[in-house]
Image (cartoon, rainbow, N blue to C red):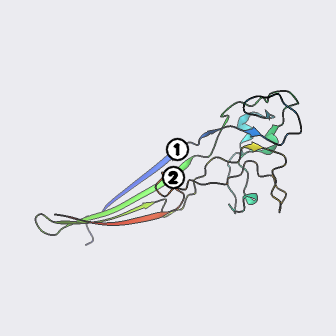
Amino acid sequence: MLGGWELTQTTTLESGQATSVTYAGSPNRYLPMGVSRPNAVVPMEQAVVSNWDIGAHRFPTSQQNPYLKFDAFAYPAAFTVGTLGRNTFEAPGMTWLQFSLSKIWQIRERTRFQLRVDMNNFPFKQPNYLQPNSTYNVNNRDNATGKNLFGTFTTLRQPYSEKGNSRPHMIVGFRVQF
């Protein structure tokens, strides 16, 4: 009963998705063009908060530490195009742990019984965020706190079977081979 167990551990580490910053709510008038991108006030490396942590509370969104610095961007002047390029920063990456524990018992010459437990994002729940709110808008504020929501996260990787799912889950399976 105690011997013969197999333990497998897989860790998936991925860098974040390349993401663009756009803008809305500008008081200026612009010529018709494609995607509206703001001006970069600082180099892009300085626009992402270094050693970022979401903070003590993920919800409500206004309690998060923003991933992007609001002061790193500005509206372009009237009838001009913003200086920021496409896919200029990288969203947070993904860390996802998977464990599997299994054992096979030989019952007769041709019959085997297998017990298997698969655990994803378990035992240490690690939320994996999708892209942050990357629409620069001076009017996008939380009504209760007045804090701007630019650079905060509203979504996690959610589908149950998707790699990087933020919910920890465990699957127990039995199998008889004959």
Task: Indicate the amino acid at tag 2.
Answer: Gly
Instruction: Say which quadrant the C terminus sits in.
Output: bottom left
Q: Secondary structure at mark 1?
A: strand
Residue at 79% in and 35% down: 38
* Residue 127 location (% of width, % of height): 58, 57
Instruction: Say which quadrant the N terminus sits in.
Output: bottom left
Dividing the picture into quadrants, the one containing residue 18 is top right
106 vs 85, nearest the viewer: 85
Residue under numbered circle 1: 14
Task: Indicate the amino acid at tag 1.
Answer: Glu
Residue under numbered circle 2: 164
Q: Are marks 2 and 1 in contact (CB under 8 Å)?
A: yes
Q: Secondary structure at mark 2?
A: loop
Asked if residue 9 can be seen in this view, the reply is yes
Residue at 72% in and 38% down: 21
* Residue 61 location (% of width, % of height): 72, 58
In-image side of 160 versus 90 (left or right): left
Asked if residue 5 can be seen in this view, the reply is no
Which one is earlier in the sequence, the residue at label 2 or at label 1?
Answer: 1
Residue most extreme to the bottom: 1
* Residue 5 location (% of width, % of height): 29, 64
In-image side of 122 versus 59 (left or right): left
Cα separation, mark 2 vs mark 1, equals 9 Å
In-image side of 161 versus 82 (left or right): left
